[in-house]
Image (tube, helix red, strand yellow):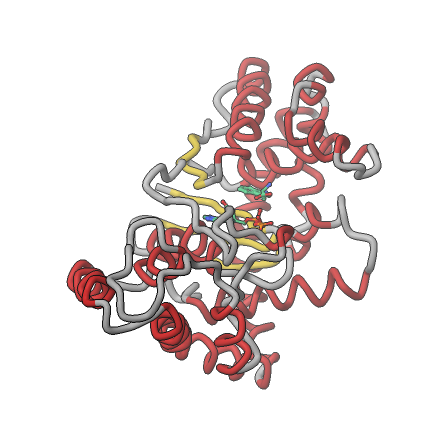
Amino acid sequence: MRILTGIQASGRLHIGNYFGAMKPMIELQESGELFTFIANYHSLTTSKDAKLLKKLTLEAVIDYLSLGIDPNKTTFWVQSDVPQVLELYWILSKFTPMGLLERAHSYKDKVAKGIPANHALFSYPVLMSADILLLDTNRVPVGKDQIQHIEITRDIATKFNNEYGEIFTLPEYMVNDEVATVSGIDGQKMSKSYDNAIDIFMESEKKLQKRCNKIISSSTPMGEPLEYEGCNIYNLASLFLDEEGKKELQARYKSGKEGYGHFKKYLKELIWSEFEEAREKREYYYNNIDEVKDILNDGAKRVQNIANKKMDIVRDAVGII
Ligand code: ADP
Ligand code: TRP
């Protein structure tokens, strides 16, 4: 079973991204043939700064490698290193009725947010379809906002197959309902747009502590038992704890011997140690960029092999010599 995920490089990653998207993806490495790429052609639809896009692409590669993408288990590459996808995108465009794209929520949402309505933004789902269909993908793990894009992919593939035979595999989306929304320091959904996030890679332990100190908590005075249910600090800490760890923390809340300051310090320690290995790997990769490039080249070569075979079939079917 082939599983494909595309990642938009969007800057500093936070704990919500980690538990909501990255950790489940890293776990998928054990359950099938995982293909993962950084979708930099997609990021181009909203990028205004070439230097920044290059920087974010490399940062995303290094962050994902550091946090657990294992190039021995996962084929990992940058989208633009396999330009065959753009040829397929063009061919698929012919099988994409305008109405299909006009109904896309993500396009309408982006335009409503003030992003200029250009053709790349409009045809974004066709490029995503090409990513998926080029590799005969069976499953695509996505957030709920991306489900419609998988449905569009299926529609395009069906239209093509109706005309030329069973050339494309119809993909299915996988939505992980078990993944809960992680709250930020203000108790709202953690998001880089709300200035309430705790980053995975903070510059120093001191800065991380400062961020944890900003978590909004109730104002029960020291010496009284504290309520852990609904407490932002507890909720964040419990992401890093097993059942036993959670019970111990609950007991500490109830004992009344410690205040919120202690729990903020404990949370800082949990976060800092969880990502210790990843920080070391990240530093290593930044100092050994050639190794990162080798990993990406290997991934791109493997994907190009699959892509070339698929494109021979597709070109032949539609009449491109
Ligand atoms: P942001 O909201 O910070 O802009 P993105 O939209 O770039 O985050 O999200 C990237 C991935 O991380 C998505 O798959 C999304 O579902 C997941 N994610 C983002 N924020 C959270 C959160 N607070 N809790 C759980 N998952 C999240
Ligand atoms: N559109 C996806 C997102 O914003 C990224 C993406 C691009 C993708 N191509 C893909 C995801 C192919 C899965 C499969 O998150």
**Tag count in the figure?**
0
- Which residue lies at the image location 43% right of the left edge and 63% below the top edge? 69
Residue in the picture at 51% in, 84% down: 284
User: Can you give x and y, in whole percent of width and height, for residue 53 in the image?
Assistant: 74, 60
Q: Nearer the viewer, residue 113 or 86?
A: 113
- The image position of residue 188, as x and y in percent, is 51, 47
Task: Assign the C terminus to one quadrant of the image.
Answer: top right
Question: In the rendered image, is residue 74 in sight?
Answer: no
Residue 274 visible to the viewer: yes
Q: Is residue 310 left or right of residue 4?
A: right
Which is more toward the observer, 120 or 164?
Answer: 120
Residue at left offset 50%, top offset 47%: 189
Is residue 304 or residue 105 the one in the foreground?
A: 105
**Percent position (x, y) of residue 42?**
68, 45
Q: Is residue 19 left or right of residue 164?
A: left
Horizontal side, residue 32 vs residue 288: left or right: left
**Identity of the residue drawn at 51% across and 30% down:** 147
Which image quarter is the N terminus in?
A: top left
Residue 276 vertical position relative to residue 131 in the rendered view, above or below: below
Residue 246 place in picture, x, y as percent: 22, 61
Left or right position of 206 against 51: left
Q: Is residue 103 above or below residue 108?
A: above
